[in-house]
Image (tube, helix red, strand yellow):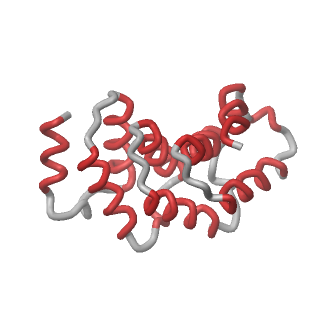
Amino acid sequence: FKKVADHIIALDNLHSFKPQELSNTVWAFAKAEESNPRLFKKVADHIVEHGNLGEFQPQHFANIIWAFARAEGSDSRLFKKVADHIIALDNLHSFNPQNLSIIVWAFAKSKEPQPQLFQKVADHILAIDNLRVFNAQECSNILWAF
């Protein structure tokens, strides 16, 4: 992990990384409990400086935000950029229950208040006719986050 992190940190930029590669990288470090604040800062800086997050899929957002929350490496700029992007979307139909539950859990765990994001997620959930699409873990994560 250290060798890979050192390599990524030494790169001039992360333009060669696709959103999935960025999300998988920080997710793997957080999952393995491999702390590397410099790597997480490099990834956060890249995403924050990225003009449009339209190439990112809901799973990428969930993995990235979860990784930062899990690694206790919250970056307010990153959380705000992701929240602003999600808030600006016309709807959340592309977000599955797991994406939604992970995202709100991560924002709450990281103590990153984003009331507009939480309202958008709440409105989306309230508009769902049948909540059976949410499993027990997703329901509990959402309730804990709110």
Which quadrant holds residue 36?
top left
Specify whether 59 is left or right of 37.
right
- Percent coordinates x, y for residue 128 in the rendering: 82, 47
Q: Residue at x 81, y 37 (%)?
A: 131
Q: Judge whether 63 appears above or below 94 on screen.
A: above
Specify whether 15 is left or right of 92.
left
Q: Residue at x 49, y 66 (%)?
A: 54
Point out the residue furthest to the front here: 111
- Residue in front for this viewpoint, 105 or 111: 111
- Percent coordinates x, y for residue 11 in the rendering: 14, 58
Specify whether 42 is left or right of 6.
right
Q: Residue at x 24, y 49 (%)?
A: 38
- Percent coordinates x, y for residue 13 in the rendering: 21, 63
Q: Judge whether 137 appears above or below 77 on screen.
A: above
- Percent coordinates x, y for residue 105 in the rendering: 60, 40
What number of labels is visible? 0
Specify whether 15 is left or right of 9.
right
Which quadrant holds residue 68?
top left
Point out the residue furthest to the bottom here: 51
- Residue in front for this viewpoint, 14 or 37: 37
Which quadrant holds residue 5?
top left
Q: Judge whether 16 appears above or below 97 on screen.
A: below
Q: Quadrant of the C terminus?
A: top right
- Residue in front for this viewpoint, 60 or 112: 112
Q: Quadrant of the N terminus?
A: top left
